[in-house]
Image (tube, rainbow, N blue to C red):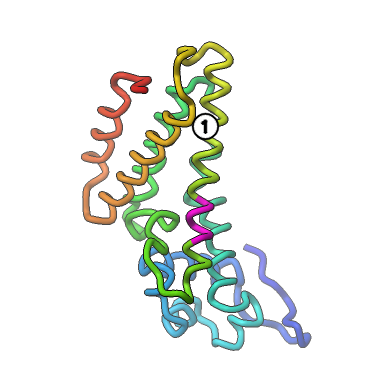
Amino acid sequence: METKKNSPIGRPRGFDTDEALERAMLVFWEHGYEGASTAGLTKAMGISTTSKYAAFGNKEELFRKVLKRYTEGPSAYLARALEEPTALGVATAILAGVVRTTTRPAHPHGCLGVQGALSTSDSGQEVRDLLVAWRADGCSCIQERFQRAVDDGDLPPQTDPKLLARYATTFAYGIAVQAASGAGRDELQELADAALRNWPLI
């Protein structure tokens, strides 16, 4: 990991910004946006509050950086799934990815993008809106991929790509909630397999 070498005033920061961001991601993932206190974040990141502001900005700015890292890291299975050659392959890879990501032993269970800010006070409304947009963007990408599958003849012509994408994402979010509630990987994978048994369902 690359360490930023100089702070805004020209002195070495003395910490690995990538590692600090990774630790912040785990705190937000486990506790949600409002549940993650500044003290808890800085302790986990191993830095002072001053260093956090200098390197990452305020709490909301830090969360935005964390969400980008989560999208490119733990949630990167979505981008890979969209490259599958068939719509069934896309859906299978999405559900397998969410099962795998939300049940890793060394990570918090559930999904940062789903549970990070389902309910917030007024001060957290922008983060809540950010995650609503994040989820909507993922669904739109899946819808576009399913539309391509219809156009290519991979899905029946009467298939509604928007409804099918909504079905897939809703089921994936349900898996994430079940994982956060303690459901095991094998159980969740069985549910995912059952959901795709009569593909396409819509």
Residue 145 falls in image quadrant: top right
Give the quarter of the image for residue 18: bottom right
Image x and y of residue 201, in percent:
34, 22
Q: For residue 12: magenta?
A: no
Q: Is residue 101 above or below residue 155?
A: below
Can you give x and y, in whole percent of width and height, for residue 134 in the image? Answer: 52, 52
Residue in front for this viewpoint, 131 or 90: 131
Residue shown at 31% from the left, 45% from the top = 174
SS category of the residue bearing label 1: helix
**Kind of residue at badge 1:** Gln
Q: Which residues are magenta?
A: 129-134
Residue drawn where x is 29% and y is 29% of the image? 195
Image: 27 above or below 8:
above
Please report the residue visible at 41 percent of the width from the left and 74 percent of the height from the top.
Answer: 121
The residue sitting at 49% across, 40% down in the picture is 139
Residue 133 inside the magenta-drawn segment: yes
**The N terminus lies in which quarter of the figure?**
bottom right
Q: Nearer the viewer, residue 141 or 20?
A: 141
- State whether the magenta stretch is mostly helix, strand or loop: helix
Q: Quadrant of the C terminus?
A: top left
Check the image and report above or below for 160 versus 19.
Answer: above
Q: Residue 89: give x, y in percent of width and height.
A: 45, 24
- Residue tagged 1: 143
